[in-house]
Image: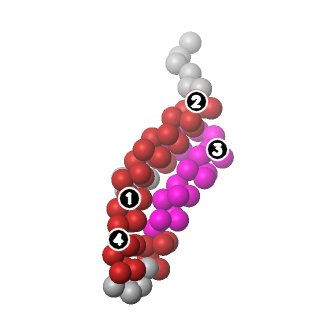
């Protein structure tokens, strides 16, 4: 009998890691947004990136394999 992964617990762990990893990235985008507002610069790209970061955990619950979760956990590292 091999080791089995509790997919439900794994999803919780992946979402927690993604949330921890995105926190400093969101903070960085907040600073960039404030600076852009101060100079009346375009904020479109910043707003889009903030939304992407907020949405990063949305599809975790739909994943059904450990491989999918492993791929997802590196999502913030690759962008």
Real-space Cα separation, disc 2 to disc 3, in angstroms: 11 Å
Give the labeled residue for mark 3: 61
Real-space Cα separation, disc 4 to disc 1, in angstroms: 9 Å
Label 4 or label 1, whichever comes before in sequence order: 1
Instruction: Give the crowd class for mark 3: few <14, some 14-19, many >=20 residues within 10 Å.
Output: some
Numbered tag placed on residue 9 in the rendering: 2
In what quadrant of the picture does the C terminus appear?
bottom left
Q: In this view, does 44 lie above or below 17?
A: below
Query: Which structural element holds mark 1?
Result: helix
Is the C-beta separation of discs 4 and 3 under 8 Å? Answer: no
Give the labeled residue for mark 4: 32
Callout in the foreground (4, 3): 4
Query: Which structural element holds mark 2?
Result: helix
The residues colored magenta run 49-70
Q: In this view, does 61 lie above or below 46?
A: above
- The percent coordinates of residue 38 (x first, y second) are 35, 81
Label 3 or label 1, whichever comes before in sequence order: 1
In what quadrant of the picture does the N terminus appear?
top right
Residue 24 visible: yes
Query: Which structural element holds mark 3?
Result: helix
Real-space Cα separation, disc 3 to disc 1, in angstroms: 25 Å
Callout in the foreground (2, 4): 4
- The percent coordinates of residue 57 (x first, y second) are 55, 50
Real-space Cα separation, disc 4 to disc 3, in angstroms: 31 Å
Real-space Cα separation, disc 2 to disc 1, in angstroms: 28 Å
Residue farthest to the top, as pictured: 1
Quarter residue 10 falls in: top right
Is the C-beta separation of discs 2 and 4 under 8 Å? Answer: no
Callout in the foreground (3, 1): 1
Is the C-beta separation of discs 2 and 3 under 8 Å? Answer: no
Label 4 or label 3, whichever comes before in sequence order: 4
């Amino acid at each position: 009998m091999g080791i089995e992964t509790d997919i439900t617990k794994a999803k919780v762990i992946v979402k927690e890691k993604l949330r921890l990893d995105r926190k400093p990235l969101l903070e960085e985008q907040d600073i960039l947004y404030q600076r852009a507002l101060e100079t009346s610069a375009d904020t479109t790209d910043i707003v889009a990136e903030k939304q992407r970061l907020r949405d990063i955990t949305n599809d975790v619950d739909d994943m059904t394999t450990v491989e999918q979760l492993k791929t997802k956990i590196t999502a913030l590292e690759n962008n």
